[in-house]
Image: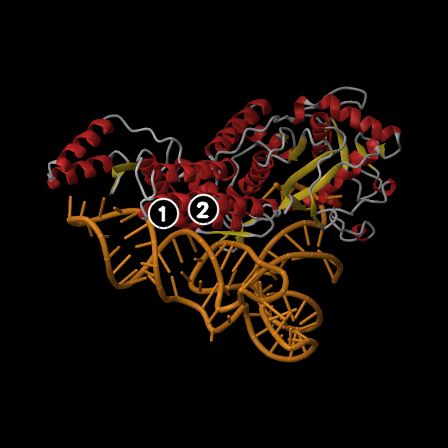
Amino acid sequence: MSLQFRDTLSGETRPFTPLNPAQVGVYSCGPTIYGPAHIGNFRSFLFADTLVRWLRASGRTVRWVVNLTDIDDKIIRTAAAEGIEIRALTDRWEAVFRADMAALRMATPDEMPRATEHIPEQIALVQQLLDKGHAYRTEDGSIFFKISSWPAYGKLARLDPEAMRVGERVEADEYSKDDVRDFVLWKAAKPGEPSWDGPLGPGRPGWHLECSAMSMRYLGESFDLHTGGIDLVFPHHEDEIAQSEAATGKPFVGTWMHCAHLHVSGDKMSKSLGNISRVSDLLAGGAEPRALRLALISAHYRTNLNYNEDSLTAAASAIARIDAFVAALNARSTITTGDAEADQRATALAEASWSRFAAAMDDDLAVPEALAALFDLVRDGNRLLDANCSGAGAQALIAVLEKINAVLAVLPDRAVLPAGAEALLAERIAARAAKDWARSDALRDELASLGVLIDDGRDGQRWRRAGPQA
RNA sequence: GGCGACGUACCCAAGUGGUCUAAGGGGGGGGUCUGCAAAACCCCUAUUCGCCGGUUCGAAUCCGGCCGUCGCCUCCA
């Protein structure tokens, strides 16, 4: 099967054909950096990460852009409430976001543009829309997109523009406009708010504008893939399409991919329910980052994911299973003798596992099936270790695990022993050779207190790290 | 009210017309191996897929109704 994705706009799952095979462009709507990201946010960012990793693992060159929204009402309010400069606030939360990303093993995006650093691009886009009659200026100097000038408006969200006249919640918007459906491109400057001068007059960009301007800046006026949470379909992405295509006259995005929400014990995560789990808090509380990553990618991206207090421990157990397997393979990998048939089967298992994994990922990123392939590989590989495969067989399995890990990023890092552990391990080997079981057991306990777990097996003593790894 | 998604074992979660007496992970029970422990392996833990009808030779998968949960309808990953 060739690579295929579900596209929100067409509603179809269809083969993926890059506009430019030399470079696939991916734009992911990133965070508003005024506070800590929660696990729901990261579910969608990890979905984008998985997408990019798979595109690369399957041989494509990718340029990945994740924006940082560093100017909006919430940021202005938060900075004012804390009595600090906006830049100080957004710098602080950008750093936290980057730390969370790294901890969860997200690939580093090629670009992480900030809205406030791309004001000229945004102004130019608004200028184009004004020139083409798709935007208008109101009395206070704000500029709105004229939805009546864009018949395709509503096609992404499948909303009827006419129906949107009803149930209007205009009062929340402090800016006057001709039509309640119109959305703001440029907000006229207000006292106490940051603003930028230029041909549009003093003001600041509306929320949707940055994504159009920055995606086109880094990926071109038309690009391949645009991702985000399902809640961004409307109005954010609908508005992006309208303002981008109205300005350029070209198709904006080839494939729109949206990630379903994460629920906590069946409820939406919300402040009122007090069930918000923040990534930094979980990590600070000792959560194994790989377990959190696994928990957040384990459901298919288009279905709701139920997260509860057991999710993390369940994922941590699954991670421990992988770790034990890797430790056993590493121990076996230096053994030169073994059962030749088991080695042949190891080679076959490695090939079959990769085929199954790749087919799953090609099918609209079927991560659950890909994980099933991984865990079946773990079980069957353990059988082959029991069947006495040699180091060659173990190495074949290690090689395929590394290929899979380039996509899922759940394998242990090359483990580093804590200070003093090396000597204890050596001493324990000697104690066991002398059948001094009491000493051997005491050393095992001592190593455990250092976070080093010991497994005794046919290949001798092997160790792995317990708990979160820095 | 409009549009849309979903309801699979104790928990998480695939499967969307026959290979399903339903994948994978976690948890639980039993066993093998082992100085012990751990790890690993083996067996068991949904003859059933919210409920009721219908279509079909055949349905968890299609259709209709009902019940329940959730999302969007200009804050939102």
Viewer-closest of B13 and B2: B13
From this view, report whether residue A300 is shown above or below residue A85.
below
For marks 1 and 2 on the same chain, the one whose residue lies earlier in the sequence: 2
Label 2 Cα crowd, 10 Å radius (few <14 / some 14-19 / many 20+): many
Residue A310 in percent (x, y) is at: 41, 51
Cβ–Cβ under 8 Å for marks 1 and 2: yes
At 36% from the left edge and 47% from the top edge, which residue is drawn?
A384
Q: Amino acid at mark 1?
A: Leu
Q: Chain of mark 2?
A: A
Quadrant of the frame with the C terminus of chain A = top left
Q: Amino acid at mark 2?
A: Leu
- Judge left or right: residue A417 versus residue A267: left
Residue A352 in percent (x, y) is at: 50, 47
Which residue does the numbered mark 1 point to in the structure image? Answer: A384
> Secondary structure beneath disc 2?
helix
Which residue does the numbered mark 2 point to in the structure image? Answer: A349
> Secondary structure beneath disc 1?
helix
Q: Chain of mark 1?
A: A
- Judge left or right: residue A158 versus residue A375: right
As drawn, the label of residue A208 is none
Residue A136: quadrant of the picture: top right
- Judge left or right: residue A266 versus residue A209: left
At 40% from the left edge and 32% from the top edge, which residue is drawn?
A413
Residue A280 in percent (x, y) is at: 46, 35
> From this viewpoint, is residue A174 visible?
no
Both marks 1 and 2 on one chain: yes
- Judge left or right: residue A134 versus residue A384: right
From this view, report whether residue A57 is shown above or below residue A161.
above
Residue B24 in percent (x, y) is at: 44, 53
